Amino acid sequence: MKAKPLSLHIPEPKARPGDTPDFSDLEIPSAGTVSRPAVDTSAKAMHDYAYDLVRVLDDDGNAVGDWDPKLDPDILRQGLRAMMLTRAYDDRMYRVQRQGKTSFYLKCTGEEAIACSQAIALQDRDMMFPSYRQQGLLIARGWSLVDMMNQVYSNTKDRLKGRQLPIMYSSKECGFFTISGNLGTQFCQAVGWAMASAYKGDTAIAASWVGDGTTAEADFHSGMTFASVYQAPVILNVVNNQWAISSYQGFAGGEQTTFASRAVGYGLPGLRVDGNDFLAVYAVTKWAEERARNNLGPTLIEHFTYRADAHSTSDDPSAYRPKEESERWPLGDPIERLKDHLIGLGQWSEEQHDELAKELKEQVKQAGKEAEANGTLGQGPQLSAKYMFEDVYKEMPWHLREQRQELGV
Amino acid sequence: MKAKPLSLHIPEPKARPGDTPDFSDLEIPSAGTVSRPAVDTSAKAMHDYAYDLVRVLDDDGNAVGDWDPKLDPDILRQGLRAMMLTRAYDDRMYRVQRQGKTSFYLKCTGEEAIACSQAIALQDRDMMFPSYRQQGLLIARGWSLVDMMNQVYSNTKDRLKGRQLPIMYSSKECGFFTISGNLGTQFCQAVGWAMASAYKGDTAIAASWVGDGTTAEADFHSGMTFASVYQAPVILNVVNNQWAISSYQGFAGGEQTTFASRAVGYGLPGLRVDGNDFLAVYAVTKWAEERARNNLGPTLIEHFTYRADAHSTSDDPSAYRPKEESERWPLGDPIERLKDHLIGLGQWSEEQHDELAKELKEQVKQAGKEAEANGTLGQGPQLSAKYMFEDVYKEMPWHLREQRQELGV
Amino acid sequence: MSRMNMIQAINSALDTMMDRDPDVLVFGEDVGYFGGVFRCTAGLQEKYGPTRCFDTPIAEGGIVATAIGMAAYGLRPVAEIQFADYIYPAFDQIVSEAARMRYRSSGEFTSPMVIRSPCGGGIFGGQTHSQSPEGLFTHVAGLKTVMPSNPYDAKGLLIASIEDDDPVLFFEPKRIYNGPFDGHHDRPVQPWTKHAKGEVPDEYYRIELGKAEVTRAGNDLTILTYGTMVHVAECAVEETGVDAEVIDLRTLLPIDVEAIENSVKKTGRCVIVHEATKTSGFGAELMALVQERCFYHLEAPIERVTGWDTPYPHAFEWEYFPGPARVQKAIRKVLEIEGVA
Amino acid sequence: MSRMNMIQAINSALDTMMDRDPDVLVFGEDVGYFGGVFRCTAGLQEKYGPTRCFDTPIAEGGIVATAIGMAAYGLRPVAEIQFADYIYPAFDQIVSEAARMRYRSSGEFTSPMVIRSPCGGGIFGGQTHSQSPEGLFTHVAGLKTVMPSNPYDAKGLLIASIEDDDPVLFFEPKRIYNGPFDGHHDRPVQPWTKHAKGEVPDEYYRIELGKAEVTRAGNDLTILTYGTMVHVAECAVEETGVDAEVIDLRTLLPIDVEAIENSVKKTGRCVIVHEATKTSGFGAELMALVQERCFYHLEAPIERVTGWDTPYPHAFEWEYFPGPARVQKAIRKVLEIEGVA
Ligand SMILES: Cc1ncc(C[n+]2csc(CCOP(=O)(O)OP(=O)(O)O)c2C)c(N)n1
Ligand SMILES: Cc1ncc(C[n+]2csc(CCOP(=O)(O)OP(=O)(O)O)c2C)c(N)n1
Ligand SMILES: [Mg+2]
Ligand SMILES: [Mg+2]
């Protein structure tokens, strides 16, 4: 019998510009339905978590089920504030880029719950190996906005001496590893850091973040393999915001299965969590943190979320996805959801919320002024170009000295 | 509460030289217990196959269960012959290397069932992207031993013109892709080839093989990802022979789970098969072949086997594993098992077997003589060094012409 | 004939080849529906369908491996690496596989494929969107390396690259996608429409690989350069008012050694200009070739003008970029020997 | 003081440093229990335990990434890449990460780590066990590249590399692991025990990175070389009977430009010898440096003796390997100019 001709399958998202976005086929379990296993549960007994979705906040803003972390309202308000500050920061920095004060900016709109709750869930000495979309980690830990802005402006107070693209922050003091422009490279580095901590009998663990698209990179596989083989104390996060610039998550394998299920093949627990649910992210992170801290090994967490805005200031998403898609996202907005929860608890009000929003906007504005006094890209005071030649090596070799002299700086 | 100090986990095999090898904790299900799913079964419904072990031949040499491919005895004898010829070939080539007639050799002892049955299960136009331990593919397809030996000797009739290390065969005619010395690189190339076939509406599929150790390479992940995303018609094989030179499979992740389970995270079916059972390997391959041929997508197969001999002529396994380990391997020898089965069927006898062994030994010897007449490495007739400069590019650029002239060839 | 910028010329080359040859496939990150972050593949998916032009996983090694497999099957894949800075995850597949396929299999399997990638600085892209890694690939036997400096060449060279039976690295200097940048970042940008090489045939044509072009004839010194730096060099020459010969190498490997030799033997002086870091950059090889072949004609040391041996720093775009002032200085240095200032 | 071959010297360097500094960790494929396919790490796991010296997954990129993470924590990892031919999967981590860590974080995070890897041919290893990729790394700002030519240097340089606060690529020419190979493959192999540099202190000592060594003083020409080729060059000099100065560069980056300049200015003639392929190899950079700095002292074109621009072919080991005959030819060519044969 002659075989039928083969054909090539190319994934295609459900909706393109002009189409009506439709998320009705997304299986979204109700909040509170997923049980919380003991932290020493074997990876194999946890397969279902890779397909389920841990959710704590229900549609009415109540915290329900096993995974409710029962956080003190102060911490909830701290988280809400961090998310709102992150958004306010993003909004301003996006605008200043548009005003030509720097070359590039990148927001995390809609994804604030992830970084903000995880920063709070982790301990100070833990080292975080973020991708470029985790500015919330710094903000939730109270890191100086002015310092962040100085970096974005590559100005005279930029601790990175104008060397890095805006948003590629580094803050060892804050446990925030220097961001790389190369996707995924930090994933296995985090594992190495965690192995070093374990080797030294330290108690600090590591965490790393990649996007859905980045899971396809080699370093994702390296990270998973080394984490599994050496049972490193590390939390490996996949932020599945549905998009990788213009490519939907089907081009990373998301058409066939969940990203959390990648954990299965390495014998690691993989959990899928509602990434727009501050409480759920916090709870799952705490679970993974406890596991790692107790030397029980690494965990993979898939944060199911949506990139509500453009990829970056270089991108216009209306060219490849329906404009209304982000509003239709069924898991809502993380800030609104935590706000509603706090109001439901009687621990917050619309008035307080509006006031806080105003306060944070002002805080960002003040920080902006302060930072701009140190210069913006190409305007105002500028760094000396001599910094270009420093820190290539610990000690400057002759050829760089010669080149610096040639430039006359 | 102060956290307890972490500690670093380093995998360690059960037995080292001096220890008594003990496989009693290996879970080996009885033959025939695993059911055979329809080829269009969804990947998700197949998780158990990634942990189970498809076995057809029972301890008494009977073919049992759903997976029995019910092969014609002629094909069984063909397979037995291929395996025996592979072993005879290996034995001779190992010896000639020891005699200094070439620089390097590498056997597949104990793993013959895999390549030999898969070569028969696949179709002629399918393209096989092997690692270096699948010489059985060529032999089972009746490829000329003399031609293979010419390559091993880098002699005047070596079609690869002395350029490749021994055993790095290439035979487009035989559907055998040029072997790379770099582990794993061919895995995603096979996917690309399969995608091309699908794009062209062709009916040919691709297959590729890597070892357990090689699953850690980036290209394994690329192959799995691209195969999943584009649902390429390809069979991806992991030959888990327990060792990667001196590293046991725990250093590739085998301590935590099976290699077949890697498939789960890509939404692909993964099956684990008794790699020393010719019938089981054949049956699982046919299942995957049918699936791919019908455009139902890729399959990952883990062949559970044991590298019974040294990694290569450069290796001495007694330095890192107990000498008796290979004899204790609970899944036996693939040749013995198929022989017993055929004898049980009344289709073979000890006498026929001995005779065939003799015949094949003689066949290899004759081929050896013929090949050696074309020269061996550094002895007898030799290739012109002019070939060194050819095929770097389709047309030789000026700088290579100059260099060839400089060498005077 | 149309007025095209380099993006349009590249798009036109791809379109022309996809139209002529169903075996030409185009893919890469964001290359399909969206048409590429620099829009070089815009409209191709719509025109040829999603199996001819499509997005890929973000896995540069996988993209190249997949292309190699397709090429081995018989197709002519054109893969895009979104930025040259991100080509390193594919380094092994390029160097160990594509480059050696023909050699190791003695021609049984080949890798007729093109890897396109935007390179170079001048766009405030910081250290991970500005690199010029071309020199690395010229050290690898089996690869061809091409870098056009204008729309006309871009189309002709890309077509020749796609038709080439060996793997070709095709680097596109992104700074000149929209206009011939001469290094004067403080002046208004020139569009390609005002440049002779912005005149591009709509139909098929080839520019042979391995052939340099003398973009300015001259007698006093030779400037060897390629990509964006061709325009910087031409500008520096004009501003210095010297009678320099500017050679746009276009293909780095195989290099057009005849053009180089002829020119340097005539002028006796040579400046080499590239944007990549200096040490072990392609300029070193050019310098070696010139000194090996023109030693007795050289009247002054050859000069290199290159990027500094540092990563490309965001804030110091113009201190890093080897602009016309530095090229002029080198020209003067090479000529001063005889008192010409 | 002991008689050591290069394997023993490397092992001794690792042992010395592991003993001195608990933050030194050694790992790689087959490096742990087995002690490495070339036995360079033999006995270290037994002595220091499996968390100090261990096997890794076969994932060169992962090995280097893990080392980077450890180094960022504060350890001093020494990773082995089993063959230099297999370093490419780690290229991105080396080039984009280790090399730039200090720069991009302005010193907040650094990568004090060593990547050891056996390189070079002469052992019938075919194209995937014979490569000399060192030149590629010298194009990358932020890396140091070292290649010793004898046991004494190997130990001293490796210790200095481990103590260095920047990432170091440490290439070990495997052909001279057991003896100083001079390229005469048809003669009995010399062991290190008969060579002065086979005398190695058991204790700690350093050889500063960035310092070349004149292994033979001379006046008629300068030979710049490193690794195995030092011995080939010395042999060729002896056989030619010329008064050549042989410089063992030892560190390629940062290069000891003073030693080069001093010598070439004295001799006026220069031959560069390496095993790596010619085009864009490190020899090109050396040639560029010499012509830039010694132009007015040069009395003849500089010559390169290198591997051919092809993959390293199994059957043609000795036709590929740049042996003493080719070096002699270059010496004669560089000198013949003045009638010296
Ligand atoms: C190695 C590498 N390849 C490509 C890019 C270009 N690039 C930057 S962001 C991006 C998409 C990443 O998507 P995802 O991982 O889903 O993260 P997200 O942006 O959605 O947070 C791409 C392709 C890069 N930075 N690095
Ligand atoms: C990229 C690369 N890294 C390392 C090696 C060296 N090497 C050759 S074989 C081998 C072990 C492979 O083990 P496995 O994948 O289990 O295959 P097996 O030999 O058991 O068939 C290693 C590390 C290589 N050839 N290529
Ligand atoms: Mg994303
Ligand atoms: Mg194995």
Image (spheres, coloured by chain):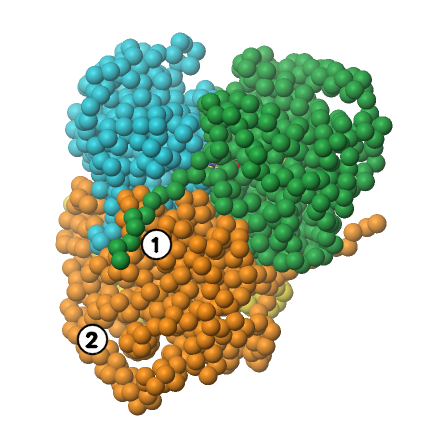
Chain colours: A orange, B green, C yellow, D cyan
Say how many tags the image has: 2
Q: Residue at x 24, y 69 (%)?
A: A142
Q: Is residue B44 left or right of residue D84?
A: right
Q: CB of residue at label 1: within 8 Å of ligand 1?
A: no
Disc 1 packing (10 Å; few <14; some 14–19; many ≥20): many
Q: Residue at x 22, y 38 (%)?
A: D164
Label 1 marks a residue whose chain is: A
Name the residue nearer the viewer: A284 or C17. Answer: A284
The answer, for residue B206, to whether it is visible in the render is: yes
- Asked whether the residues under marks 1 and 2 belong to the same chain, the reply is yes
Residue designated by label 1 = A293
Q: x, y percentage for residue B124?
A: 74, 40
What is the three-letter code of the residue carrying label 2? Ala
Name the residue nearer the viewer: C216 or C209. Answer: C209
What quarter of the picture does the C terminus of chain D occupy? top left
Q: x, y percentage for residue C163?
A: 58, 49
A355 versus A151 height, above or below: below
Identify the image quadrant of residue D62. Answer: top left
Q: Is residue C207 left or right of residue B198?
A: left
What is the three-letter code of the residue carrying label 1? Arg
Identify the image quadrant of residue D11. Answer: top left
What quarter of the picture does the N terminus of chain D occupy? top left
The image's mark for residue A367 is 2
Q: x, y percentage for residue D248?
A: 25, 25
